[in-house]
Image (cartoon, helix red, strand yellow):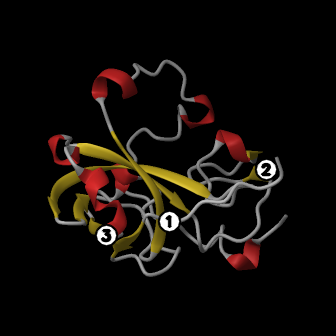
């Protein structure tokens, strides 16, 4: 199989207009608000979603061009394989974030703790279910000693076009 094609089901809106300055994870976004506009033809698929407090947003890194198989991620000066990081420059530019769902008005989801650039194409939504999705993590890999005390960290320019490699 050479290619897989996806069509967006909506668009994500946030206060973050570019890649620099975006929180690097939802847990570090300090309550940043946003909305998700689900295209009207997919609105029926939102039925019962309002019964969940958190959702996964699966999206396309539309501003990320190229990739490297090794990167120096945020919070570390050492290089790691891209699949051992959450870096946006990936062979397939797919992102995932868990955000808090505050309310739904027709086809618009109001969310909190967003770490996504405005205008990002939405590929899918899935409910976060603590019973299925929570694990008592025992190994955090290279991040184990890097995340203690991190309360806010925003993206710099390390993954912008000027730093593109393929």
For residue 70, the mark is 2
How far apart are the alpha carbons under marks 3 and 2? Answer: 40 Å
Q: Quadrant of residue 88?
A: bottom right
From the viewer's side, name the closer residue of 104 and 115: 104
Estimate the x, y position of residue 85 in percent, counting from the top left: 63, 45
Label located before the other in sequence (1 or 3): 1
Q: Secondary structure at mark 1?
A: loop
Estimate the x, y position of residue 52 in percent, counting from the top left: 20, 41
What residue is shown with label 1?
8
Left or right, 37 with respect to 158, comes to left
What residue is shown with label 3?
40
From the viewer's side, name the closer residue of 154 and 135: 135
Label located before the other in sequence (2 or 1): 1
- The residue sitting at 80% across, 50% down in the picture is 69
Q: Which mark lies nearer to you, 1 or 3?
A: 3
Estimate the x, y position of residue 41 in percent, counting from the top left: 35, 66
Label located before the other in sequence (3 or 2): 3
């Amino acid at each position: 199989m050479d290619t897989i094609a996806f069509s967006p089901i909506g668009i994500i809106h946030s206060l973050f207009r570019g890649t620099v300055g975006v929180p690097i994870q939802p847990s570090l976004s300090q309550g940043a608000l946003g909305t998700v506009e689900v295209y009207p033809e997919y609105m029926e698929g939102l039925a019962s979603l309002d019964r969940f407090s958190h959702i996964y947003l699966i999206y396309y890194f539309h501003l990320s061009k190229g990739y490297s198989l090794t990167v120096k991620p945020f919070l570390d000066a050492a290089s790691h394989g891209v699949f051992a990081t959450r870096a946006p420059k990936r062979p397939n530019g797919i992102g995932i974030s868990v955000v808090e769902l505050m309310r739904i008005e027709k086809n618009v989801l109001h969310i909190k703790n967003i770490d996504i650039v405005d205008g990002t194409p939405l590929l899918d939504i899935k409910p976060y279910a603590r019973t299925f999705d929570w694990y008592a993590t025992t190994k955090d890999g290279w991040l184990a000693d890097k995340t203690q005390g991190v309360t806010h960290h925003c993206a710099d320019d390390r993954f912008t076009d000027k730093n593109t490699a393929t």
